[in-house]
Amino acid sequence: QKEVEQNSGPLSVPEGAIASLNCTYSDRGSQSFFWYRQYSGKSPELIMSIYSNGDKEDGRFTAQLNKASQYVSLLIRDSQPSDSATYLCAVRGGSYIPTFGRGTSLIVHP
Amino acid sequence: KAGVTQTPRYLIKTRGQQVTLSCSPISGHRSVSWYQQTPGQGLQFLFEYFSETQRNKGNFPGRFSGRQFSNSRSEMNVSTLELGDSALYLCASSLGGHNEKLFFGSGTQLSVL
């Protein structure tokens, strides 16, 4: 069974710090990787997608992928209180449907 | 461009009843997938429709069913509701390719009493 593991948290960081969110997956055939942000009571919103090994940067967000270690991470630089949310890691292999982790709760305190 | 639209936003039903949820995808998106989200289980895949055909199905009982219309709009039906069906039901649309990103609707919060 394909699994995606995330630390449930909460991860608490001070405003302005770097938040590091991690995700591991079991399916070595996984091809695409996504990070979604979900505010309480809202639906998931896509933040980043990454398909090849290395780093991908978009503004304050950097996704990192290491397929050999089956590991994907999301770094949030200059964290803001508005970044406080649950972050879901999703991994897609040969099928059309991604498998989601249960999410990591991030709290950015002023 | 309009986003994914789900209706209704909230539903309260009693055990044994049935319910139908609706999802209108982003214009041009041909894939609609449905998810159940609960605090204990996270986001769980129900099924996916592409061009009016069910392309994938998750591990849910047959009480959960769906369909997709020619305009890509999709409906999900749950029959003989149980208390454990109380959850946030999310639909997501995409263009339909292997690596396509999912765009979620606001969800339908279903409470079964």
Image (tube, coloured by chain):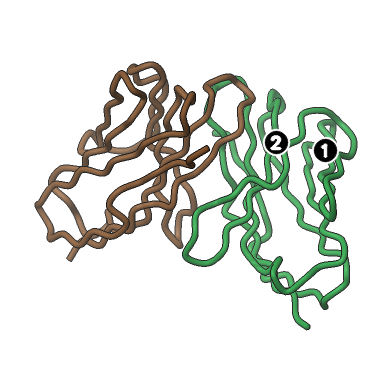
Chain colours: A green, B brown
Q: Are marks 1 and 2 in contact (CB under 8 Å)?
A: yes
Residue A53 relative to residue B78: left or right: right
Give the number of the disc on residue A33. 2
Image point 20% across, 43% down: which residue?
B20
Residue A70 versus residue A85 in the image, above or below? above
In-front residue for pair A16/B111: A16
Residue at 79% across, 48% down: A73
Give me the chain letter of mark 2: A
Instruction: Give residue B61's position: percent from left, percent from top.
Output: 26, 37
Residue at 48% x, 48% y is B43
Which of pointers 1 and 2 lies earlier in the amino acid sequence?
2
The outermost residue toward the left is B16
What kind of residue is marked 2? Phe
Per the image, label 1 sits on a secondary structure element best described as strand
Q: Nearer the viewer, residue A104 or B89?
A: B89
Location of the N terminus of chain A (image quadrant): top right
SS class, disc 2: strand
